[in-house]
């Protein structure tokens, strides 16, 4: 029979008689080593932190629901994209990129928009940003780029010279730099911004046909941004402004919603389209590939335990499900490795057994066993490591008449083959137009926003060396002559 347990216990469940006074040798004497309750408290406290994410360390997580309003079975067998009206549980983690866990929310920085669908065929993650593009088109540059966004290793200060030096020497960043320095570079909160899958992914259907796809999440709250002056004040008053905004909205039942859209390209069109569709520094212009609305994302439930569910959530572009695949995008290819690797280090080898990470819509069945912290019960589908009766190897002869339960792979979910050609090489100059789309964005901005863009750029570019300023002016001029001229003039060059 279980006793009433609303008293404090130690980790082994034993009642604690005194949690306020250490065990000492005499009233004024030193503490005894046998005070194992004190030792447990101090030792566990020392282990409360896990490494923060190397990027996107500060974030807000919320559960929600995706409702499909357009059936996509013509393009994909993915369960959550089939059958109008189907609802799929989701989790979204919003974040800033460059700051540490305690940094202010209202920084000029891309915002992470990491979305998980808990589908009936496993977890599908789209780990995107609030920008349709990125600074780079090759993952080999990512660590260097992030070094310029984080603190200078000697001064421990943010370093505008490093940032602009890197952007000057990597003109492919110009489009994203224009997005970052525009009004949308400081969203007012996480509800009033769009999200983008950013990369090109693939969809495949039951006929073995592949399509290239981009995901867009358009806010139904309306876009709202902060001026640099508003942001500077808010950072001081409330460094957690975006977290607070989300907690309040969910508590008030004011559930934020996004219209989910896709752009779809037939597989073969990638070979002839004028833009390399796998270049993450580019969008697919809407005139060429219009948005198709397919559903609504609503966020409606805060996690109960921030550490367990938000700090330990392990979103990864490699979490794909049948009907959704990767693409040759070189950035995406690097990310397919980077996230799970980071999470094994940051959380531990069995991070996928945690309740926020295990599949909710189905059970994980595999031959992986043991490792640190193995054996967590998935609250949705029971033990994930398998019991004594299930085989821990494959192929095996398990089945109904066998003494072991067997698992088998299933060709029903085989992805269509992707035709590849070309010579293995390190290609650097396969797409040299770094400027047209940056210019297109500049040209669609209203005059007042152009003026703020110039001011935002020059605010930090003016703190850099003359050679960096001159190179950047050349880049801006190639995007748009007026853009370059106004920056040159504001810098006084
Ligand atoms: P469109 O005119 O069809 O699209 C313009 C896009 O720009 C819209 O998606 C709009 O988003 C977005 N936009 C509007 N105002 C701003 C702003 N102040 N800051 C940032 N984005 C804004 O033209 P294209 O498709 O040819 O794209 C032109 C440029 O627009 C691109 O070079 C790119 O920089 C930007 N863009 C394009 C997107 C795409 O997928 N094609 C997506 C987002 C931006 P909204 O409707 O939410 O206001
Ligand atoms: C987080 C690497 C590009 C969006 C992370 C993390 C790593 C990483 C290691 C931490 C993961 C974790 O510890 O859980 C990389 C690499 C990139 C890259 C190597 C390029 C090759 C991008 C791009 C986007 C993006 C292009 C968006 C389009 C995010 C988001 C998170 C994140 C949203 C936070 C996920 C969360 O909320 O937990 N990235 N990244 N990253 N990255 Fe990237």
Image: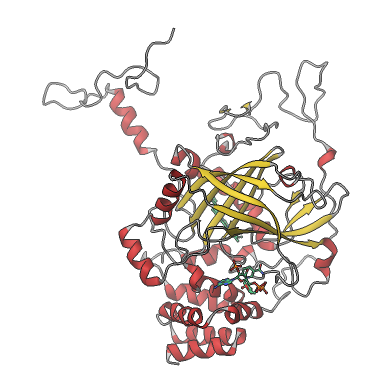
Work out which residue is located at the far top of the displayed protein and give it. 1
Q: Which quadrant of the frame does ligand 1 lie within?
A: bottom right
Residue 379 visible to the viewer: yes
**Residue drawn at the location 49% of the way across and 51% of the way down:** 53
Whole-percent x and y of residue 465?
43, 83
Q: Report the label total.
A: 0
Q: Position of residue 162 (x, y in %)?
A: 46, 73
Q: Position of residue 33 (x, y in %)?
A: 26, 24
Query: How has the structure been colored for display?
Result: secondary structure
Q: Nearer the viewer, residue 116 or 58?
A: 116
In the rendered view, does 211 fall on the left or right side of 95?
right
Is residue 422 visible in the rendered image? The answer is no
Q: Is residue 356 left or right of residue 198?
A: left
In the visual, does 114 lie left or right of 408?
A: left
The residue at 45%/47% (across/down) is 51
Taking 75 as reference, is 490 left or right? left
Q: Is residue 22 above or below residue 65?
A: above
Placement of 75 over or under 230, stated as above or below: above
Looking at the rendering, which quadrant does residue 129 occupy? Answer: bottom right
Location of residue 239 by image quarter: bottom left
Q: Residue furthest right?
A: 207
Q: Measuring from the top left, give residue 153's x and y in whole percent.
A: 41, 64
Q: Quadrant of the N terminus?
A: top left
Q: Toward the viewer: 93 or 258?
A: 258
Quadrant of the frame with the C terminus: bottom left
Residue sitting nearer the eye, 29 or 125: 125
Q: Is residue 135 above or below residue 72?
A: below
Q: Nearer the viewer, residue 131 or 339?
A: 131
């Amino acid at each position: 029979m279980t006793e009433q347990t609303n008293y404090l216990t130690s980790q082994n469940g034993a009642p604690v008689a005194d949690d306020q006074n250490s065990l000492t040798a005499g009233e004024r004497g030193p503490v005894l080593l046998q005070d194992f309750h004190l030792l447990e408290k101090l030792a566990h406290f020392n282990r409360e932190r896990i490494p923060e994410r190397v990027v996107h360390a500060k974030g807000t997580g919320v559960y929600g629901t995706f409702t499909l309003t357009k059936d996509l079975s013509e393009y994909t067998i993915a369960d959550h994209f089939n059958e109008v009206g189907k609802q799929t549980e989701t989790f979204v983690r919003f974040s800033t990129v460059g700051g540490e866990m305690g940094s202010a929310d209202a920084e000029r920085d891309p915002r992470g928009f990491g979305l998980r669908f808990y589908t009936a065929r496993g977890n599908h993650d789209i780990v995107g940003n609030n920008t349709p593009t990125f600074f780079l088109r090759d993952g080999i540059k990512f660590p260097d780029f992030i070094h310029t966004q984080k603190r200078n290793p000697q001064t421990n200060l943010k370093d505008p010279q490093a940032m602009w030096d890197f952007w000057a020497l990597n003109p492919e960043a110009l489009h994203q730099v224009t997005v970052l320095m525009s009004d949308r570079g400081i969203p007012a909160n996480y509800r009033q911004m769009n999200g983008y899958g950013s990369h090109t992914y693939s969809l495949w259907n039951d006929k073995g046909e592949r399509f290239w796809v981009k995901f867009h999440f358009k806010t139904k709250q309306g876009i709202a941004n902060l001026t640099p002056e508003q942001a500077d004040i808010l950072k001081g008053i409330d460094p957690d402004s975006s977290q607070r905004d989300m907690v309040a909205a969910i508590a008030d039942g004011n559930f934020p919603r996004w219209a989910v859209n896709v752009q779809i390209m037939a597989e073969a069109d990638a070979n002839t389209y004028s833009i390399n569709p796998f270049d993450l520094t580019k969008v697919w212009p809407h005139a060429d590939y219009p948005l198709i609305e397919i559903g609504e994302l609503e966020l409606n439930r805060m996690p109960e335990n921030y550490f367990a569910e938000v700090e330990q959530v392990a979103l990864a572009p490699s979490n794909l499900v049948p009907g959704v695949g990767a693409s040759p995008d070189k950035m995406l290819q690097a990310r397919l490795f980077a996230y799970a690797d980071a999470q094994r280090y940051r959380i531990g080898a069995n991070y996928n057994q945690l309740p926020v990470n295990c599949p909710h819509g189905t059970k994980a069945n595999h031959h992986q066993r043991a490792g640190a912290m193995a054996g967590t019960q998935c609250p949705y589908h029971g033990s994930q490591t398998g019991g004594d009766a299930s085989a821990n190897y494959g192929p095996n002869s398990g089945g109904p008449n066998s003494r072991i339960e067997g698992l088998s792979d299933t060709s029903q979910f085989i992805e269509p083959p992707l035709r590849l050609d070309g010579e293995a090489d390190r290609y650097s100059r396969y797409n040299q137009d770094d400027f047209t789309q940056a210019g297109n964005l500049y040209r669609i901005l209203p005059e007042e926003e152009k003026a703020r863009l110039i001011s935002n750029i020059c605010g930090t570019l003016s703190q850099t060396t003359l050679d960096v300023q001159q190179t950047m002016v050349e880049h801006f001029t190639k995007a748009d002559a007026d853009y370059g001229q106004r920056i040159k003039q504001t810098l006084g060059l």
